[in-house]
Image (spheres, grey):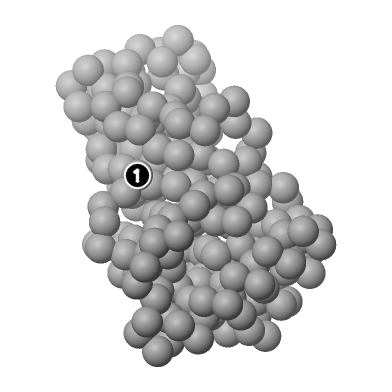
Amino acid sequence: MTLADEITDSFRTFRAFTFKDVHMVLAEKHKRISDKTIQVTLSRMARRKRIYPIIKGVFSLERRDDIAGFAFTPFYYGGLAALMIRDMIDDQVRMEIMTTRRVKRSFVGVYNGVSMVVVHHLPKKYYFGFNDMRYGNITVPVSSPEKTLIDLFYYKERLSLQDYTEVLKSIKIGTLRKYLRPYNKRTKKMVMKFVRTYGPLAKSGKLSSPY
């Protein structure tokens, strides 16, 4: 079995893996293996499309945008991506990644720039309110309707009013209040005012005009 075969076999069930992960796996069998040997092997595998670099130092065995978030662990999919995954909007949108890791840019090229994803740094105190969901043939962490709405306001993402219909219909006020506790008064006021104003219209099917 070649080193490339060992890497493929070892990470078959992983959504993403790093150079460090590969080094740990190979070092158990090959005590004197060098970093350079691993780097050359990974580069050759990438050229032959046996692996795909998501971002620098992070790889996957498939080139799929819905896997990109795993390069930014800990993370969850939020914002418009959460609405899409939960079938609350019909549009196909870029994957929107909420991560506690520091990021330099909001739009990040993945898979050598083949695709773009949106990445938001999320303070650790706001890293909650998500659950695992089946999306296609994989399971991904996705923000709840309540946390999705909060994140949309926190990151100042403004949608057409009708695009909030399904998320407003799914909001549980008790959960929303709980999730808003760590946020400042301005965010709390904006979110609660929006829900009180437009929630009843969404549930009655009258939330249709843009603002």
Residue 172 appears at what percent x and percent y? 58, 84
Q: Residue furthest left?
A: 48
Instruction: Name the residue carrying label 1.
Output: 94
Residue 61 appears at what percent x and percent y? 28, 39
Q: Residue at x 54, y 27 (%)?
A: 105
Q: Residue at x 49, y 15 (%)?
A: 35
Q: In the structure shown, which secondary structural element does the residue marked by tag 1 occupy?
A: loop
Q: How many marks?
A: 1
| Quarter of the rendering occupied by the N terminus | top left
Q: Nearer the viewer, residue 27 or 62?
A: 62
Q: Residue at x 72, y 60 (%)?
A: 187
Residue 62 appears at what percent x and percent y? 25, 40
| Quarter of the rendering occupied by the C terminus | bottom left
Q: Residue at x 74, y 66 (%)?
A: 188
Left or right position of 138 against 197: left
- Residue 114 visible in image: yes
Q: Nearer the viewer, residue 175 or 89?
A: 89
- Residue 8 visible in image: no
**In which quarter of the view is residue 88 placed?**
bottom left
Name the amino acid, label 1: Arg
- Within 10 Å of disc 1 (Cα), the crowding (few <14, some 14-19, many 20+) is some
Q: Nearer the viewer, residue 32 or 45?
A: 45
Residue 174 sits above or below residue 23 on the image: below
Residue 93 appears at what percent x and percent y? 31, 49
**In which quarter of the view is residue 153 placed?**
bottom right
Residue 24 sits above or below residue 74 on the image: above
Left or right position of 169 against 100: left
Left or right position of 30 against 146: left
Residue 41 sits above or below residue 70 on the image: above
Q: Residue furthest bottom?
A: 204
